[in-house]
């Protein structure tokens, strides 16, 4: 996945989680109308986010901002 594509998915995810769950499918259909792979990726992220909701240690966004490191920020020791 390219960095630009991940940035787009991350931004759309943020928009989607701000919506009521009942409105998310329509949102994904609208914003990913020509990209079924992106729609599927977002749907999976939203499902993981919803599944984790209410559990101890809930994710800070399913995109993993709190724990995800891109190769440019990872250091070797």
Image (cartoon, rainbow, N blue to C red):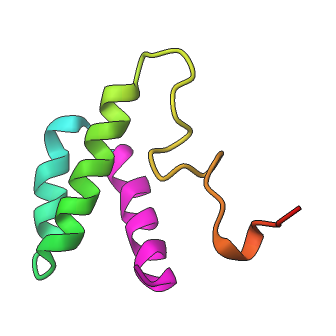
| Marker count (numbered) | 0
Q: From what the image shows, is residue 44 above or below residue 20?
A: below
Residue 32 seen from this side: no
The residue closer to the viewer here, 1 or 12, is: 1
The x and y percentages for residue 51 are: 31, 28
Name the residue located 33 percent from the left edge and 38 percent from the top edge: 48
The image quadrant of residue 32 is bottom left
**Residue lying farthest to the front in this orientation:** 77
Left or right of 63 in this view: 71 = right
Q: From what the image shows, is residue 51 above or below residue 2?
A: above
Name the residue located 53 percent from the left edge and 15 percent from the top edge: 56
The x and y percentages for residue 55 are: 45, 16
Q: From what the image shows, is residue 15 above or below residue 70?
A: above
Name the residue located 42 percent from the left edge and 16 percent from the top edge: 54
Quadrant in which the C terminus is drawn: bottom right
The x and y percentages for residue 13 are: 38, 56
Name the residue located 26 percent from the left edge and 61 percent from the top edge: 41
Q: Is residue 5 magenta?
A: yes
Left or right of 12 in this view: 64 = right
Q: Is residue 29 magenta?
A: no
Left or right of 1 in this view: 75 = right
Q: Main secondary structure of the magenta part?
A: helix
Quadrant in which the N terminus is drawn: bottom left
Left or right of 33 in this view: 56 = right
The x and y percentages for residue 42 are: 27, 58
Magenta segment, which residues? 1-18
Residue 48 seen from this side: yes
Q: From what the image shows, is residue 27 above or below residue 32?
A: above
């Amino acid at each position: 996945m390219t960095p630009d594509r991940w940035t787009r998915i991350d931004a759309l995810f943020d928009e989607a989680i701000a919506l009521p769950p009942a409105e998310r499918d329509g949102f994904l259909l609208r914003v990913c109308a020509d990209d079924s792979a992106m729609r599927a990726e977002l749907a999976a992220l939203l499902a993981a986010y919803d599944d984790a909701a209410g559990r101890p240690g809930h994710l800070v966004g399913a995109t993993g901002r709190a724990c995800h490191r891109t190769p440019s920020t990872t250091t070797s020791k």
